[in-house]
Image: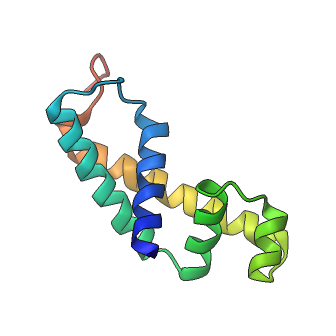
Amino acid sequence: MLERYYREVANFLLRRRLRPSPSPAPQSKVELSAQTEYLLHRLQQLPRRRREAFVLHRFYGLAYTEIAQHMRIPSNQVEQHIRIAMQACRQELKAYHSTKPSLRRAGSAS
């Protein structure tokens, strides 16, 4: 069940970052799928508590205070977990894009 949540979170993050066109070309769909798998793998590498806070906030839209109550930790720790998880995801996507020249946006500098 958690696998499904992580996959949905990865897709959500990729949609926000890449903003694909309403009907992407078949090759774009394949590349998005590869990115989703890559990001899903990265999410699974996060510590359990950090991953839990991240999923609850970014996918389910819970507020820091709600997550803090659920996890029984201070809200500033929730904020820290989410911030670090987002940094890790951004770094991983940046690394992914730097190794995949075909994914660079049209018109961007090489």
Q: Is residue 28 left or right of residue 46?
A: left
- Viewport quadrant of the N terminus: bottom left
Residue located farthest toward the front when viewing the structure as drawn: 1
What residue is rendered at 84% in x and 76% in y?
74
Out of 36 and 23, give the one closest to the viewer.
23
Q: Is residue 94 left or right of residue 104?
A: right
Q: Position of residue 67 (x, y in %)?
A: 76, 69
What residue is rendered at 36% in x and 29% in y?
20
What residue is rendered at 81% in x and 67% in y?
66
What residue is rendered at 74% in x and 80% in y?
71
Looking at the picture, does residue 66 appear above or below residue 23? Answer: below
Res. 14 image quadrant: top left
Q: In this view, does 35 lie to the left or right of 71?
A: left
Out of 80 and 1, give the one closest to the viewer.
1
Colour scheme of the rendered structure: rainbow
Res. 43 image quadrant: bottom left
Q: Position of residue 79 (x, y in %)?
A: 74, 63
Res. 110 image quadrant: top left
